[in-house]
Image (cartoon, rainbow, N blue to C red):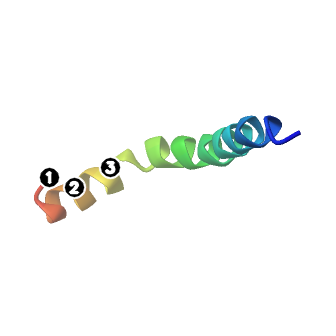
Amino acid sequence: MVGWLPALAVVLAVLAAGPWWLGRRRRSKDLLKITETAGL
């Protein structure tokens, strides 16, 4: 019964990361500024 919990967690993580990743790519210029400020 517990075997589907990790799979569900992975699916939720992907669904949550999708819009975040798209937004991150869309704000790539801001991300570059942040990384430069952080010294990365």
Q: Residue furthest right?
A: 1
Q: CA distance from mark 1 to mark 3?
A: 14 Å
* Mark in front: 1 vs 3: 1
Secondary element at image label 1: loop
Location of residue 3 by image quarter: top right
Question: How would you rate the neighbour count of disc 1 (Cα within 10 Å): few for under 14, some for 14-19, many for 20 or more?
Answer: few
Q: Residue furthest front?
A: 1
Residue ID for mark 2: 35
Q: Amino acid at mark 1?
A: Leu
Number of labels in the image equals 3
Q: Residue at x 15, y 57 (%)?
A: 36
Question: Residue at the location (43% across, 50% down)?
Answer: 27
Image coordinates of residue 31 in percent, x first then y, are 33, 53
Q: Residues within 10 Å of mark 2 (few under 14, many from 20)?
A: few
Residue indicated by mark 1: 40
Q: Is residue 31 left or right of residue 6?
A: left
Query: Which quadrant of the rendered structure holds the N terminus?
Result: top right
- Specify which label sits upstream in the sequence, 2 or 3: 3
Report if the CB atoms under discs 2 and 3 are less than 8 Å apart: no
- Quick one: which residue is furthest to the left in this view? 39
Label 2 and label 3: CA atoms lie apart by 10 Å
Q: In this view of the protein, which residue sits in the foreground, 26 or 35?
A: 35
- Closer to viewer: mark 2 or mark 3: 2
Say which label, 1 or 3, has the lower sequence index: 3
CB atoms at circles 1 and 2 under 8 Å apart?
yes
Amino acid type of the residue that numbered disc 2 sits on in the rendered structure? Thr
Q: Earlier in the sequence, mark 1 or mark 2?
A: 2
Residue at the bottom extreme of this rendering: 37
Q: Which residue is mark 3?
A: 29
